[in-house]
Amino acid sequence: MHYFIADLHLNERQPEITELFLQFMRENAPLADSVYILGDLFDFWIGDDEDSELIRTVKTAIQTLTTQGVPCYFICGNRDFLLGKTFAEQTGMQLLPDYYLIDLYGKKTLICHGDTLCIDDIKYQQFRRKVHQKWRQRLFLCLPLWLRLKIAHKIRAKSRADKGTKSAQIMDINPQFTAETVANLGAEWLIHGHTHKQAVHICNISSESDRLFTRIVLGDWGKTASILAVDEKGFAFNEIR
């Protein structure tokens, strides 16, 4: 059994989501062969030197899981792309690149956060390219923690304002680009988050091909937890409340 989760957006304002995460880590995750966190575990992340009761609690939960022998893998999201090696070393979590192929019971599966598939959101993609430049990240991480926090709040406010002017279609994945990405990597399944639209889609690789692939979208966490469970019999979404 392998578990996949994404888009928890853990923060101090919504302790109920943190409690759901801790319940999952106590009751479900220890029974798994592996746990994959596909981005936006935190609502935002300004550097591995950030510290709070919430961060310490999450670190302890992940470290407890990995010391029990359950591998935990992480792909960064658009909110926590600065989560890095120090956090991983402290928790035993393994960092993965933006696109990663795994074998799930014979199914070649591509996993990612999902924001890279939303190419119609041109402003976001321009922003993403900038903030993923290593020199910009190093410069940002050299700033005092209080200043990074102030900058992060401004970015968050602008992001919320921008969302109000964008259509749902623009903020969703681009079907053709997504199919091309899956085809180029030879995957049969795609698992991603980011859009918060829990669903399963059967998609054509192209209009000229009869070849299909399965796109599984992880939901975000709120009053319930969206957890994808995959075993040798197939996959299903589990919820905990």
Image (tube, grey):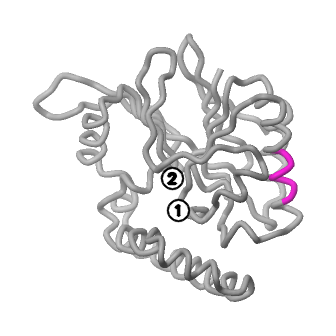
**Residue at the outermost top position:** 233
Tell me if 211 is positioned left or right of 234 in this view.
Answer: left
Tell me if 50 is positioned left or right of 37 in this view.
Answer: right
Assess disc 1: are there few (<14), some (14-19) or many (≥20) residues with their C-alpha within 10 Å of its C-alpha: many
Residue under the point 64% across and 61% down: 83
Contact? badges 1 and 2 (CB < 8 Å): yes
**In the rendered image, the vertical position of residue 31 relative to residue 76, given as above or below:** above
Q: Position of residue 237 (x, y in %)?
A: 61, 29
Q: Position of residue 37 (x, y in %)?
A: 62, 44
Residue under numbered circle 1 = 78
Reply yes or no: does residue 58 show up in magenta. Answer: yes
**From the image, which quarter does the C terminus lie in?**
top right
Q: Position of residue 8 (x, y in %)?
A: 67, 52
Residue under the point 79% across and 61% down: 14
Quote the CA–CA distance across marks 1 and 2. Answer: 8 Å
Number of marks in the rendered image: 2
What numbered label is drawn on residue 194? Answer: 2
| Mark 1 or 2, closer to the camera | 1
Residue kind at label 2, given as amino acid type: His
**From the image, which quarter does the N terminus lie in?**
top right
Q: Nearer the viewer, residue 12 or 147?
A: 147
Residue kind at label 1, given as amino acid type: Asn
Secondary structure under tag 2 reads loop
Tell me if 133 is positioned left or right of 25 in this view.
Answer: left
Residue range (magenta): 56-61
**In the rendered image, the vertical position of residue 200 relative to residue 63, given as above or below:** above
Secondary structure under tag 1 reads loop
**In the rendered image, the vertical position of residue 60 relative to residue 146, given as above or below:** above
